[in-house]
Amino acid sequence: MPKATFNFPAGFLWGSAAAAHCVEGASPTSDWSEWEQQPGHIADGSRVGRGCEWWSGRWREDFDRAEESYQKALRFSIEWARVQPELDRWDEPALDRYRDMLLGLKQRGIIPIVCLHHYTNPLWLAEAGGWENEQSVDYYVNYARRVVEALKAHCALWISFASPEAYIRAAYQAGTFPPGKRDVTAAARALMNLAKAHAAAHQAVHALQPEAQLGFTQVWTGVGQGKPRAELPRGAFALAFRTGRLELGNLRENLPQLKGTLDFLGIDYFSRENARPSPTAKKKKGAEPGQSDLAEAQEIGRTANDPDGLREAIKWGWKFDLPMYITANTCDETADEFRRRFLIEHVHALWHMVNNNAPVRGYLHWSLVDHFAWEQGWSAKYGLWSVDPQTQQRARRQSADLYAEICRTGSLSSEMVEKHCPEIFDRIFPV
C-alpha cells in the first residue's frame, strides 16, 4: 500500500461546534422551547428537555473531551433569551455562566468562536413580530453590545448569525421553525433585517473590541444550482456584503452600510441539495477512484457523502476574498461507519483546496456530542460522542478517535485511513 500524509498548515484550527438550545436544554423564555411543545413540530415527538445539561455545568466534561481529542477550537452560541429574558431586563448571572464557559475553554487551550444568534429568539421578540419588525435590528444590536462588552476579554471570534438564509427559509418560508410562517414576502423582510442587524452589530462590536472578528455562516447546498423556485434566492444574503445591495425577489434595497462589515465567512456544508439520495440508493457502477459517489447515503438518508460539494462551497466562498472557516460539516448516523468515510473524504477534499491556497483557516466538526437537533429532535445522531438524553451517559465513537488523530497531527495520513476506514483506502491513495 502507498504511504503518504496530507499535511495542513501550522496553526490550522481543528475543532467542533454546538448550538445553545440543543445542548443547554430548554429556556422557558425562548421561542423554541414553546414551539416544540406543540404537536407535530418535532419529527420524533421529543423535546429538548435537559439537552446535554450544559447549562447545569456538564459542559465541563464535554470540554474535557474536546481537549483530550486535541481540538483547538470550539464554536458554541449564546442563548439570547437567557441573557435578556424580558425587553427591559438583563440577566447578569447568565452572562457569568457564559464567562465561565469561555474561561473553561481558555484553561484547556481551546479557542472559542461564539455565535450570538443560532436560530432562537426571546419570546418577547417573537411576540413583537420577530424579525419582520424593523425594531429587531436595534434590539439585536443592543443584545450584541451587551454580550461582547461582558465577554470580550475571553473571545475575539464572533458569529453574528448562524446560516441566516437557512434560518429564515425554515422559519418564514417552510414553516418548520418558529414562527412557522409560509410567506416568501415575510421571509424577505426578515432576512433584510438580519442583514441590517449584522452591519450595525459590526460597528458596535468593533467600537467595543477593535481586534474582534465578526462574520456569519452560510449553509452551502449548491448556490445557483437546481431549478428556480418561488423562494429566496440562494447566496443573495452573502453577496449583498460585497455589492451593498440586497435583492430578494420583489424586495430590493440599496444597503451600502453592509460593505466592509464581514471579517470572515463561515461555511456550513453537509451535502449539495441535488445530491441527496434516498436511503435505498445503490452505489453507482463504474465510479473511478477519487470520484464523489453521490449515491452513498447513511441509514436515514439525510446527507450524501459528496466531498466534491465541499470543494465547490470553498470555491464559492473564495470570491469574497476573506478568511474562511468550515464552521459545520457532518452527517447523521448511529452505526458510525458512514461518518468515518464522510470525515476522511471531506478532510481530504479540504486539504486539496487549502493546498491550492484557499484561505480556509479552520475546520469544525458538527458536533462534539449528540444533541437535540431542531425539527429532527433526538432522532438525529451528529456527535463524535453519543449521548443518551435520559441518562446523560456519553459514549465515545470510533470517529472520535479518528478525528483526534487528525487534530493531533494536523494531517490526514495513509495510516489513519488504513486503520479507521480501509474500504476507501484506494479512493484516497490510488495506486
Image: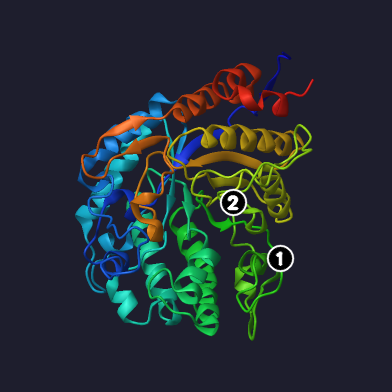
Task: Name which residue type carries label 2.
Answer: Ile
- Foreground of the two, 356 or 417: 417
Q: Quadrant of residue 398?
A: top left
Q: Percent from the top left, x then y, of residue 57?
A: 22, 41
Q: Nearer the viewer, mark 1 or mark 2?
A: 1
427 displayed left or right of 273: right
Which residue, given by chain and number where applicable, does mark 1 sit on?
A: 226
Q: Earlier in the sequence, mark 1 or mark 2?
A: 1
- Foreground of the two, 248 or 341: 341
- The residues tagged by marks 1 and 2 sit, at their Cα atoms, a distance apart of 20 Å
- Is residue 107 in view? no
Label number found at residue 267:
2
Label number found at residue 39:
none
Q: Residue at image x 51%, y 66%?
A: 198
- Foreground of the two, 157 or 173: 173
Answer yes or no: do the residues labelled 1 and 2 have beta carbons within 8 Å? no
Crowding at label 2, few (<14), some or many (≥20) Cα neighbours within 10 Å?
many
Q: In which quadrant will I find the N terminus?
A: top right
Q: Percent from the top left, x then y, of residue 356?
A: 77, 37
Q: Percent from the top left, x then y, of residue 271?
A: 61, 51
